[in-house]
Image (cartoon, coloured by chain):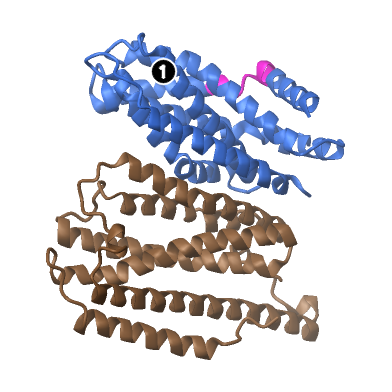
Chain colours: A blue, B brown
């Protein structure tokens, strides 16, 4: 299992390094959206819950771009057929794809969150960095799991680009609620407040439930 | 397989239960001390919402059974349950909105967590039909729809929890009044409305199942009479078209 997942992840990362389709697009999208928010809200600096909302909505929409592309190569270049012919556990594909989406999100955020801090964020979030990283990581896990599931569900449909956001946005709403609530005290004007622990618990619970669920149903999306 | 069994009894039971429930609502249950007459919409709104949520979860359960057994009848049941629950959900949102306008003065109140989580669940399930419609292969359509139904069914309770935690509870908690706090005559009326609405939902499900099944059989008979060439080709549809 570990070798299979490793091979699949390496394949996807190499593909991304050569084609550069997803990550640059996600990053450009995030930065453009920050600029849009600056003009849309007509504010130079954001703080507190407004800052958290802008950050999380932007990251979520950027993640939807990644979900759209996640399985396209498998479908169009016959990757599904090749994988199904190989005598390996089907769940390996799910684990690998979720890991790849997680890696994309981490790379995008490594650039987009500093860009957000420079462009829009008023108070310095430097003190709260470890807390923010914990929130980001837990939220990314949830987005990666649900995104992989939705991407696999939508890739076989005719209206792929429409189905992904339609399904993913309501499904990921609890993640946005929890992540925005958890990070809004970190961006407070008066200096970073304490991290609300119960929202981290909600995020972890969401991640766990959907990881188990995806583990159970993913096979049915491949069987042909 | 017969889907129409017991339809007459169920229909009569729904009519009787709902009529007597509404008779109780208007002539027996007391007016609410705070909200007055408007509060009576509670006896319509809450049962509709509960039935819709249970219908969504039932759709997920049938989806799971379809995935495990491959029996297309379960796919049909899952489709019908979610389809009718969507209609119930629209009714719940509309009645909830009317209630909010009457008692809080606004058509939409973000502080009421039950209403907001219901909207999110509705938005998610509104994608069910487009998802089915955009998959052509009937076997794959059934399988993917079942996976969606299972995921969404599990999403319902998680979503309610997250939204409820996020909203500050400034407004009266509606669902908690269904517990021990409700006076006896109100509770009796409410339980009867709930039973009537459940009965109505099951009856409507049976009607739709029977109708879908009848058109499938009709098509099979036509094919036997006229052969494949004599039949108009099936149009693409979100509903299952074969068993």
Which residue shows up at 31% across the image and 81% down it?
Answer: B21
Q: In which quadrant of the rendered view does residue A75 lie? A: top right
- Main SS, magenta region, reads helix
Up-down: is B45 above or below B122?
below
Up-down: is A179 above or below B234?
above
Up-down: is B77 above or below A203?
below
Can you give x and y, in whole percent of width and height, for residue B50 in the image? 40, 64
Which residue shows up at 40% across the image and 45% down it?
Answer: B161
Residue denoted by label 1: A131
Chain of residue at mark 1: A
Question: Is label 1 in a helix, a strand or a loop?
Answer: helix
Can you give x and y, in whole percent of width and height, for residue B160 in the image? 40, 49
Q: Is residue A206 visible?
A: yes
Q: Is residue B114 left or right of residue A66?
A: left
Q: Residues within 10 Å of mark 1 (few under 14, many from 20)?
A: some
Which residue shows up at 21% across the image and 58% down it?
Answer: B100
* Depth order, front residue of B196/A201: A201
Q: In which quadrant of the rendered view does residue A59 lie? A: top left
Magenta stretch encompasses residue A156: no
Task: Locate the N terminus of chain A and report the quarter of the image it occupies.
Answer: top right
Can you give x and y, in whole percent of width and height, for residue B163 in the image? 36, 44
* Depth order, front residue of A127/A50: A127
Q: Is residue B117 left or right of residue A50?
A: right
Q: Which residues are magenta?
A: A16-25
Marks counted in the figure total 1
* Depth order, front residue of B32/A153: B32
Q: Is residue B241 visible?
A: no
Can you give x and y, in whole percent of width and height, for residue A73 in the image? 70, 32
Magenta stretch encompasses residue A20: yes
């Amino acid at each position: 299992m570990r070798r299979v997942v490793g091979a699949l992840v390496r394949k996807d990362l190499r593909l991304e390094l050569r084609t550069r389709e997803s990550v640059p697009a996600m990053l450009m999208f995030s930065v453009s959206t920050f600029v849009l928010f600056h003009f849309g809200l007509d504010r130079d600096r954001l703080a507190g819950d407004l800052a958290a909302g802008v950050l999380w909505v932007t990251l979520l929409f950027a993640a939807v771009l990644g979900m759209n592309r996640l399985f396209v190569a498998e479908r169009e270049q016959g990757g599904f057929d090749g994988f199904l012919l190989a005598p390996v556990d089907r769940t390996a594909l799910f684990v690998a794809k979720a890991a790849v989406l997680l890696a994309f999100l981490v790379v995008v955020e490594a650039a987009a969150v500093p860009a957000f801090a420079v462009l829009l964020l008023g108070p310095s979030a430097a003190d709260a960095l470890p807390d923010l990283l914990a929130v980001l990581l837990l939220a990314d896990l949830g987005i990666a799991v649900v995104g992989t599931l939705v991407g696999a569900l939508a890739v076989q449909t005719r209206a792929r680009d429409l189905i992904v956001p339609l399904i993913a946005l309501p499904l990921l709403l609890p993640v946005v609620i929890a992540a925005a609530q958890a990070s809004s005290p970190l961006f407070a004007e008066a200096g970073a407040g304490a991290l609300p622990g119960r929202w981290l618990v909600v995020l972890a619970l969401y991640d766990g439930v959907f990881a188990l669920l995806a583990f159970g149903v993913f096979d049915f999306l491949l069987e042909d | 397989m017969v889907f129409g069994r017991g339809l007459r009894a169920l229909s009569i039971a729904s009519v009787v239960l709902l009529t007597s429930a509404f008779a109780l609502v208007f002539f027996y249950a007391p007016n609410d001390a705070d909200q007055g007459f408007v509060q009576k919409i509670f006896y319509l709104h809450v049962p509709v919402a509960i039935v819709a949520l249970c219908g969504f979860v039932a759709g997920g359960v049938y989806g799971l059974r379809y995935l495990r057994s491959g029996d297309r009848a379960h796919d049909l049941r899952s489709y019908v349950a979610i389809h009718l629950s969507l209609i119930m959900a629209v009714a719940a949102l509309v009645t909830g909105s009317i209630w909010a306008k009457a008692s809080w003065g606004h058509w939409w109140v973000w502080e009421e967590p039950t209403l907001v989580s219901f909207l999110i669940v509705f938005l998610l399930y509104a994608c069910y039909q487009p998802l089915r419609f955009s998959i052509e292969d009937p076997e794959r359509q059934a399988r993917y729809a079942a996976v969606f139904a299972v995921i969404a069914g599990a999403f319902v309770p998680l979503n309610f929890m997250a939204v409820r935690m996020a909203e500050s509870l400034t407004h009266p908690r509606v669902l908690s009044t269904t517990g021990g706090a409700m006076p006896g005559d109100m509770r009796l009326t409410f339980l009867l409305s709930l039973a009537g609405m459940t009965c109505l939902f099951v009856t409507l499900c049976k009607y739709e199942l029977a109708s879908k099944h009848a058109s499938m059989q009709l098509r099979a008979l036509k094919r036997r009479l006229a052969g494949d060439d004599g039949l108009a080709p099936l149009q693409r549809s979100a509903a299952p078209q074969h068993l």
